[in-house]
Amino acid sequence: MLKNLLFLVFLLVTTNTFAQDTLKFEKALTVASGSRYGREATYTDLLAWQMANGKLQLPKENGEFAVNKTGEKIIWRTIKADTTGRFSAFSRRCVQGTNNPFLNPGGVDRGSDYIYVNYTSPKEQTAILNVIGGNSLFFNGIPHMGDPYGSGFMNIPVHLKKGLNELFVRGASILPMIFINAKKLLIHTDDITLPSIVLNQVNGILKGAITISNSSLQDCSSLRLKTILNGKQQEVAISRIGKLSMRKVIFELDASAINKPGNYNLELQLSQGKTSLDEKTIVIEALESSSTHKQTFISKIDGSLQYFAVTPQLNGWKPNSALFLSVHGAGVEAIGQAKAYKSKDWGTVVAATNRRPRGFNWEDWGRQDALEVLALAKNQFKPDDKQIYLTGHSMGGHGTWFLGATYPDKWAAIAPAAGYASLKDYGSADGKIPDSSKNIIEKLLLRAGNQSDVPKLATNYTPLGVYILHGDADKVVPVTYARQMKKLLSGFHADFSYYEYPGGEHWFGDQSVDWPPIFSFFKWHFIPADSTVNRIDFMTSSPGISATYRWATIYQQAQPLQYSRIVLKRDKKLSTIVGKTENVAVLKLALTDFDAKIPLKITLDSLTSINYTTRTLNDTVFLAKNNESWKIITKIDKRDKNPIRSGTFKEAFNHKMVFVVGTNGTADANQANLNKAKYDSESWYYRGNGAVDIITDKEYSEQKYQGRNIILYGNAENNSSWKKLLKNCPIQVSNSQITVKQHSWKGDDLAAYYIWPQQDNKLLIGVVASTGTTGMKAAYANQYFAGGSGFPDFMIFSSELAKEGSAGIKLAGFYNNKWQFDENNIAKP
């Protein structure tokens, strides 16, 4: 019977690289499943819903998958691989009226197709699965990150059952391979983070990172990685690699023996005790100090190794010169971005990475990467604080618009090239963010992503010089996006330049970014000192993303994630601050530029003035708005929401977060918890070049993991760390129900994403919870890693989310500023 179900013939190819057999496939089945993912908290995926609820039937050629809304059957169709083993189905971004036989009748079908292959293993064994293409996949029901950008480095260890093994891939063009008989621990050389060796600089111990897979059924600890470079050895202990998982690990290399430019072999040796596990040789480049090069650093976000690229200043670095931060386009490496610039005689070009070539569209953790690199570059190159500039191309043009509006006091001028302002208008690979919704829950979810609507923040550009460059023949990012921003700025901005390059396509050579008029424009722009800026006009959607402009900070909002604005005027001669606010609950003012013992009058929103006498030269005051009056707060509770810890759910994936997996439940519940944590870890690695520690609840201790954010997987009954961390949280999840104050829902298919503050004043707990395995499977999708997607502080849903979208959400909302559940900040059906 099993033979009759199989329709695939696999190709057996011996590869010398890993001393293993590579299985490729000749036939597959595909279906127009109607799945829909994007830059939103919600998604629909009927196949995932069927799988979670035990309703997915074994696919058969011309077999029925489902019935659509018009009553017509959606069927599985056979497709054949090309000579390389790649399956190309059909584009799901099709329009009504096409003759596509797979299109669900009734309109545009915007999701991704599913492709199905299977393999009958003669025995139980482990292997490495590599699927090039596809957004995500299920292997024997376990979710894994796909390879949507065709990078080729997602080498996922899997457990093959004896008999039928099934692979469902969400994607329209995929190349699936299974590597059998590989070493259980493998060094992979297809995703390396390396610095350059820069001659005539300090080149002692440098850091790199490489991916190691563990396809055994045991966690591997006490591992060591040795490097040998030009006779110099360096060895480090590396992090534990869990069973059937992969991890990017940091190694060290000693470059002190390198004194000439060129390419050098770097040997890597992986061992455990006296046992040698694997060896590889990679190439590292040594460069003259005048060359564009890479530098690595350990990110504060997750403790992983990232890099940035530098095009050095002409004729050598000089302090108090300019600094140009350049942000790259989709699919572009930071080193390629930096190499597009000729060295400048008046400053250094530094290119951040966005964590990956596509990463997070310079939002979310891409935004944080840019800020990390900016801080490192300022510390290293000691630029003139008045001459910091921002520019970028394509997705980096969006990054320039976004970072410029979000942090307007960090730049003297910005120059977006071939850019789009908002993910609501352009979208990019993960699609667009919807502009609005009539559904109350969807409106709240979109509100959680307000920071992405850059045109709403356009007044923040007022103090900046802005140079817009765009080719008028650009077909990738049409010039209409530049014209949109030109029109918007024309209404209020007095200092911007605009140029359409005649006949210019999306990339018209290095001058697409290294455009001399941009740098001429930069040269006569400076960041004024805070002491000279007496008028402030600043907007933000979240203090947790951007709170401060000059001497004023939006410390707390009245309505979370709605736009907040302050317009303030300071008169040092009259000793007054006058202004108006929108959606501000607490305002922080630095009074540094007033002398000590000066009586001040502060008048906000035309309400009763506040009189305050400065005590020192460095006074700071906090003002709170209550009952239509402003008052000085003498005591601030640092545990309240504030710019350091403000929410939303996405903020939990920070501060070197550790994933804590519940293991105190049934075997199925424990496995579902682990599956979700590993899928999140793989997604974080793929999208963010990151690495995460995954531990069990039994391994967790507050002392050992002090100073780190915690992500809990499970519920109060199956995760033994729950009561330690969440006993005071208003949201509680058991095996049978979820309760939030007076609200409760029962069932085994419920799930929740939410945050809760730790006991200190800085860190968060993120929670991925479910009442049962069906609920955890409904929570498998991790849309929170899509750049620009909006997630509130908490979101409770059932497995119907995968089938019905937002109709499956039970409750969503934000805590108030005291981290209390507040009926005024929620949405429910």
Image: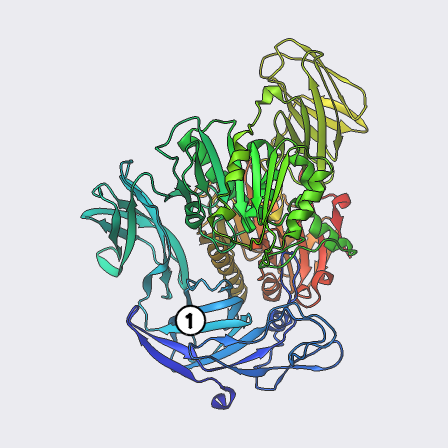
The reply, left or right, for residue 586 in relation to residue 470 is right
User: Height in image: 341 above or below 550?
Assistant: below
The reply, left or right, for residue 323 in relation to residue 258 is right
Question: In terms of image quadrants, where is residue 717?
Answer: bottom right
Who is closer to the viewer here, 790 or 677?
A: 790
Q: Which residue is mark 1?
A: 159
Q: Farthest left residue?
A: 231
The reply, left or right, for residue 204 in relation to residue 699 is left
- From the top left corner, tell me how far across and down residue 397 is, in percent: 57, 47
User: Height in image: 236 above or below 643?
Assistant: below
User: Height in image: 81 above or below 412?
Assistant: below
Residues packed near mark 1 inside 10 Å, few (<14), some (14 to 19) or many (20 plus): some
Q: Quadrant of the C terminus?
A: bottom right
- Identified at 32% across, 62% down, the residue is 186
Badge 1 amino acid: His
Q: Secondary structure at mark 1?
A: strand
- Identified at 40% across, 73% down, the residue is 178
Who is closer to the viewer here, 335 or 354?
A: 335
- Identified at 62% across, 24% down, the residue is 551
Question: In terms of image quadrants, where is residue 773?
Answer: bottom right
- From the top left corner, tell me how far across and down residue 155 is, in percent: 41, 65
